[in-house]
Image (tube, rainbow, N blue to C red):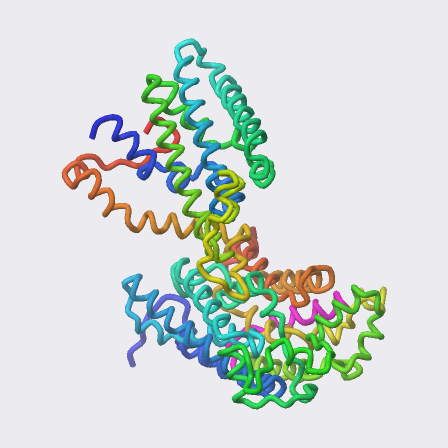
Amino acid sequence: MNQIQEISWQGLWKNNPALVQMLGLCPLLAVTNTFINGLGLGIATLLVLIGSNISVSVVRNWIPNEIRIPVFVMIIASLVTIVQLLMNAYTYELYQTLGIFIPLIVTNCAIIGRAEAFASKNSVPLAAWDGFMMGSGFLVVLLVLGGIRELLGNGTLFSGADLLLGDFASNWTVHLFDFEQHFLVSILPPGAFIIMGLLIALKNRYEKRIEALVVGESKKSEKIERARVTTES
Amino acid sequence: MNFKVSSSPHNRIKRKTSDVMLAVILACIPGILAQVWYFGIGVLVQIALAITAALLTEIICLRQRNRSFMQIKDNSALLTGLLLGICLPPLAPWWIAVIGACFAIVIAKQIYGGLGQNLFNPAMAGYVVLLVSFPLAMTLWLPPLNLIEYSLSAWDMILVIFTGYSDQGYSLAQFRTSLDGITMATPLDAIKTGLSNQQTYQEILQQNIFNHDFGIGWMQVNLAYLLGGLWLLQRKIINWRIPLTFIASLFLLSGICYLASPQSIADPLMQITSGATMFAAFFILTDPVTASTTPKGRIIYALLVASLVFVIRNWGGYPEAVAFAVLLANMCVPLIDYYTKPRTYGHVKG
């Protein structure tokens, strides 16, 4: 497994920001009541993460160690503002639905975590790739969580797709089943916690099997170490 | 003679978990009979559904956790199903009981590690999920049978539960309005609605669901549960501290407020004889796993539940509050237990 593959593996599964590092749970749990909301926030986070990783990596040799955190925060905040203004301009309804959680991307620890742990120590292409993979890992969890919650709570999928993708997607909503009464708790905040917990449990259940599949038996037995989330992985 | 030397405790009660659970189940019988008398055979169907779902889920979970499914013999899943079934509206659709029981067993009990490890009372967790998810179906209580003008046969009730419509095609909503447009809520519900409509408590009591001082049917059901609870106390299955503190403090709290403003609050006797008060006091709060276990802790725990019930009933969004109050108090139990550890004999205080 070369470095590029290793980064993808870490971001998507082994060190997934949502399922393993459990960073950025606040927006994760708050906005995933539909698939499209999850997608919107996921893409926004992904863009910010790529941008911040690249910028941090570019300036990494000129930042004094003592003030690196404020600098990272400034970079992330500017990128979040850019994304926020873009969403305000092009996907205004989704922007209103997501509300405060777009500005709150700036406090998403997954982003500053990657800046600190990876981007400030690696070259630009690697940092960009890491940002993309970590962001995708986050995005996938948002989509799965949003999908499950929307399915259980509304019986639909992709409702409100036109908010993000434009008018041509307005009839994308899939009605999978239609009960008189929906399982409301899955749209409410407690449902987010419960389903998130179940997803983590599911991941842990199949952890070994999938790791053996991807990494291979031989490599797995070589090193046994804790998944570290605070420093370089 | 052969003297055995053994360490304390010397006085042991040789009582198995399954026997305790069975005694609690038996003690529910008078209450269930009263419920069936006033609300019809639907109560039994709900209980049967909840128990079946709970037992099946428990077996599946035990298999998944590589435990012997003979653990089902500890009767705890049976009791959870029974307690949940008792709480359900008699004519709720069948899947309500099934979802509730599955949630209670899987999420509230087995995920925490099975019997003895659960933080929350499984039956109440299942009930709250149902109440939050399906508020409409979960608050559709029928008026007591003798107040419905259209007589409802047992077969009709079963049809309504499983298909949603009775033999003649009446739906649940029609039964609820008693076919002549008089909406019948539970007494607590009626009080809540009436008070928010600026009626005084005394005016509300004139509605035909009340028999001057009490909700018809609900008082008798509560008394029947009190009877079962007293039997449990007498058998020393449960400790007197929790039920007594709970009922007394609920009575006192509502008594004080009733004296201060008798028009805007239900009187204390109504508070302790309606809704799930007695059932909760003896059967829900006393759950040995999720309740506090120290003598002082039990009193604090019951006091906490009583004040929460009182606050939520009178100022909260839901007419009945026991389930929420119990779950909130369950969360505090580890803390309560930590600070009320009894002094070990021979050790200094503190």
Q: Quadrant of the C terminus of chain A?
A: top left
Identity of the residue furthest to the left in this view: A218
Rendered image quadrant of residue B117: bottom left
Q: Which residues, given as a range, are shown in magenta?
A: B235-254
**B107 relative to B323 in the view: left or right:** left
Q: How many marks?
A: 0
Identify the residue at image location x=54%, y=83%: B42
Q: Which secondary structure type mostly characterizes the magenta part of the structure?
A: helix
Decide if residue A38 is in sight here: yes
Identity of the residue furthest to the front in this view: A168
A214 in the magenta segment = no
Question: Relative to B208, does residue A51 appear above or below in the rendering?
Answer: above
Q: Quadrant of the N terminus of chain A?
A: top left
Question: Relative to A123, does residue B240 appear above or below in the rendering?
Answer: below
Residue A141 rendering spot, x and y as whole percentages: 40, 43
Question: Relative to A131, does residue B221 appear above or below in the rendering?
Answer: below
Rendered image quadrant of residue B220: bottom right
Identify the residue at image location x=50%, y=78%: B163
Identify the residue at image location x=54%, y=70%: B286
Nearer to the camera, A6 or B148: B148
Residue A85 rendering spot, x and y as whole percentages: 57, 27
Nearer to the camera, B103 or A84: A84
Residue B191 rendering spot, x and y as whole percentages: 75, 71
Rendered image quadrant of residue B317: bottom right
Decide if residue B348 is in sight here: no
Residue B231 rendering spot, x and y as whole percentages: 56, 83
Nearer to the camera, A161 or B115: A161
Nearer to the camera, B242 or B59: B59
**B290 relative to B146 in the view: left or right:** left
